[in-house]
Image (spheres, rainbow, N blue to C red):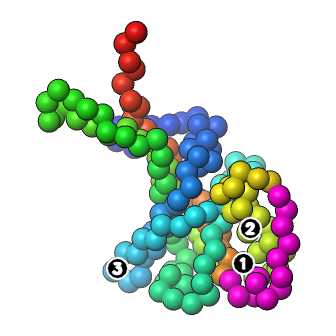
């Protein structure tokens, strides 16, 4: 990372950002064409490994690209806001973000799909409820995960207000 002063190195601070964000932009690549999609997600962090979970239709451009190239990047951000300056060059923007890379795996078994959907529901609702899903629903949806090879955090804080 070029700006070490903006880097977040504390893992709990990075997980806090992942927990507070609700949309992840998943970046895919097909031949020489990039493709980015904003998605709701769930996640798990265990044994130092981050896994993101997504769901969607079983067909379409995203699925076609994933089947040809299962490498992905991802980005999420929160705590956004304009930092007002007294001159144009002193304006800036506050943010906290996570960027990472990983491998996509399509989940096949009903247990894997149920567990992933429950992680998505937990993250999006804040409720750790273990739902069950009808087989027809599980068979009709594509559930996939990204196992992160690496991810980094970056931030720019709002200036401290003088007391």
SS type, badge 2:
helix
Nearer to us of marks 1 and 2 is 2
- Asked if residue 25 shows in the view, the reply is yes
Q: Residue at x 56, y 55 (%)?
A: 22
Above or below: residue 96 compared with residue 39: above
In the rendered structure, are the residues bearing label 1 and label 2 in contact, judged by CB atoms less than 8 Å apart? yes
Quadrant occupied by the N terminus: top left
- The mark that comes first in sequence, 2 or 3, is 3
Nearer-the-camera pick, 158 or 65:
158
Q: Residue at x 22, y 35 (%)?
A: 91
Above or below: residue 89 compared with residue 69: above
Is residue 121 toward the left or the right of residue 72 in the image?
right
Residue 116: assigned label: 2
Residue 33: assigned label: 3
Q: Position of residue 7 (x, y in %)?
A: 45, 37
In the rendered structure, are the residues bearing label 1 and label 3 in contact, judged by CB atoms less than 8 Å apart? no
Q: Position of residue 146 (x, y in %)?
A: 61, 66
Q: Residue at x 54, y 81 (%)?
A: 66
Distance from Cα at disc 1 to Cα at disc 3: 25 Å
Distance from Cα at disc 1 to Cα at disc 2: 9 Å
Residue 107: assigned label: 1
- The mark that comes first in sequence, 1 or 3, is 3
Nearer-the-camera pick, 73 or 20:
20
Is residue 44 toward the left or the right of residue 23 in the image?
right
Magenta residues, as a range?
129-141
SS type, badge 1:
loop
Badge 1 density bin: few <14, some 14–19, many ≥20, Cα 10 Å? some
Taking the magenta stretch, the answer to whether it contains residue 137 is yes
């Amino acid at each position: 990372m070029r700006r070490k002063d903006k880097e977040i190195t504390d893992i709990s601070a990075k997980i806090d950002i992942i927990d507070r964000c609700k949309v992840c932009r998943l970046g895919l690549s097909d031949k020489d064409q990039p493709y980015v999609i904003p998605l709701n997600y769930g996640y798990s962090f265990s044994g130092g490994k981050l896994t993101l979970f997504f769901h969607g239709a079983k067909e379409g451009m995203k699925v076609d690209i994933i089947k040809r190239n299962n490498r992905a990047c991802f980005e999420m951000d929160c705590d956004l806001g304009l930092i007002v300056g007294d001159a144009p060059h002193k304006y800036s923007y506050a943010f906290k973000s996570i960027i990472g890379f990983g491998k996509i795996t399509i989940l096949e078994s009903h247990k894997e799909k149920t567990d992933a959907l429950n992680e998505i529901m937990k993250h999006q609702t804040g409720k750790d409820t273990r739902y069950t899903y009808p087989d027809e629903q599980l068979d009709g949806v594509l559930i996939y995960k990204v196992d992160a090879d690496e991810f980094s955090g970056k931030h720019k804080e709002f200036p401290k207000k003088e007391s």
